[in-house]
Image (spheres, rainbow, N blue to C red):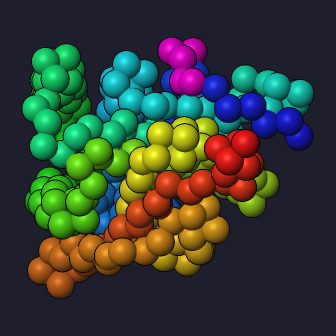
């Protein structure tokens, strides 16, 4: 198996959506926020993910993992989307402002046509409020953070190093730039243990509580790491 990590393209989007839907089918957060499972509309979900993917091609670090030596070289085996760091005290750029509004309008249009597709809107806003509170508390580095917004691997490919390669595409960059990384995991075991091996540390447990029915997310931060090779280079 020869895994190759490349930027997401328009042609990759259907496969990326397949991977995300399969990998998150039994995710605790997914089941909490789509609590009325008979109403879950996977078609609407595909449209929503497609909008996010196209936005991510322009505005995020969006990568896919494939095996070009396999019998299905274009099959997407894993997906990762990172939001780039922005200075905490700096103003939002005009382009970022426009792109956020374009994303919002597309999502509003989707909701008008497809409805909510089983999404528990109250729980969605509970999560957003808790996320904003946690990030305000934890994001203390003025340089900003690389935020791992999506990381997922097909169930049959898990444990084969695909996720690690997707991570390294950005964590290596963060190390070179001396920047921190951040993620929120919806599973403690085994996910946080895996992320710890990649340099992350658990800094907060975020409880999203809807009248006693809660979803717990695990906030993790990764400090930039300096390799021995880079130290030797600097000393020479």
Q: Measuring 43% from the left and 40% from the top, which residue is drawn there?
A: 82
Instruction: Evaluate whether residue 164 shows in this view.
Output: no
Specify the farthest residue to the front: 236
Return the x and y of residue 227 as percentages of the image width and height. Answer: 67, 53
Which x, y percent locates residue 209?
Answer: 18, 76
Residue 1 forms part of the magenta stretch: no
Where is 189 relative to 1, above or below? below
Is the N terminus in the top left, top right, bottom left or bottom right quadrant?
top right
Residue appearing at x 72%, y 23% in the figure: 74
- The one nearer the camera, 213 or 201, is 201
Q: Residue at x 24, y 76 (%)?
A: 207
Between 14 and 188, the one nearer to me in the picture: 188
Q: From the viewer's perspective, is residue 98 above or below residue 136? A: above
Query: Can residue 101 be seen in this snapshot?
Result: yes
Query: Relative to 89, is 41 on the left or the right?
Result: right
Could you tell me residue 46's position as x and y percent? 41, 33
| 12 relative to 170, above or below | above
Q: Nearer the viewer, residue 162 or 13?
A: 162
Relative horizontal placement of residue 233, taking residue 196 as reference (left or right):
right
Q: Choose between 25 and 164: the one closer to the eye.
A: 164
Q: Residue at x 73, y 42 (%)?
A: 236
Tell me the magenta residue range.
7-11
Q: Position of residue 218 (x, y in %)?
A: 38, 71
Relative to 129, is 190 on the left or the right?
A: right
């Amino acid at each position: 198996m020869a895994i190759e990590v490349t930027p997401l393209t328009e042609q990759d989007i259907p496969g990326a959506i397949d991977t995300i839907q399969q990998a998150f089918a039994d995710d605790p957060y997914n089941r909490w926020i789509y609590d009325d499972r008979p109403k879950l509309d996977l078609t609407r979900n595909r449209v929503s993910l497609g909008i996010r993917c196209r936005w991510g091609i322009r505005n995020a670090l969006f990568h896919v993992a494939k095996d070009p030596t396999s019998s299905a070289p274009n099959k997407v085996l894993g997906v990762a989307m990172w939001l780039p760091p922005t200075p905490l005290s700096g103003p939002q750029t005009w382009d970022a402002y426009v792109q956020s509004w374009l994303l919002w309008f597309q999502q509003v249009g989707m909701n008008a046509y497809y409805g909510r597709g089983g999404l528990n809107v109250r729980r969605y806003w509970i999560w957003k409020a808790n996320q904003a509170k946690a990030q305000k508390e934890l994001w203390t580095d003025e340089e900003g953070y690389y935020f791992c917004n999506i990381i997922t691997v097909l169930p049959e490919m898990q444990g084969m190093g695909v996720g690690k390669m997707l991570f390294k595409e950005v964590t290596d960059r963060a190390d070179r730039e001396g920047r921190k990384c951040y993620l929120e995991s919806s599973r403690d075991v085994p996910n946080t243990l895996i992320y710890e091996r990649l340099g992350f540390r658990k800094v907060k447990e975020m409880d999203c509580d809807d009248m006693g029915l809660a979803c717990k997310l695990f906030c993790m931060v990764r400090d930039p790491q300096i390799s021995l090779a880079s130290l030797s280079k600097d000393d020479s």
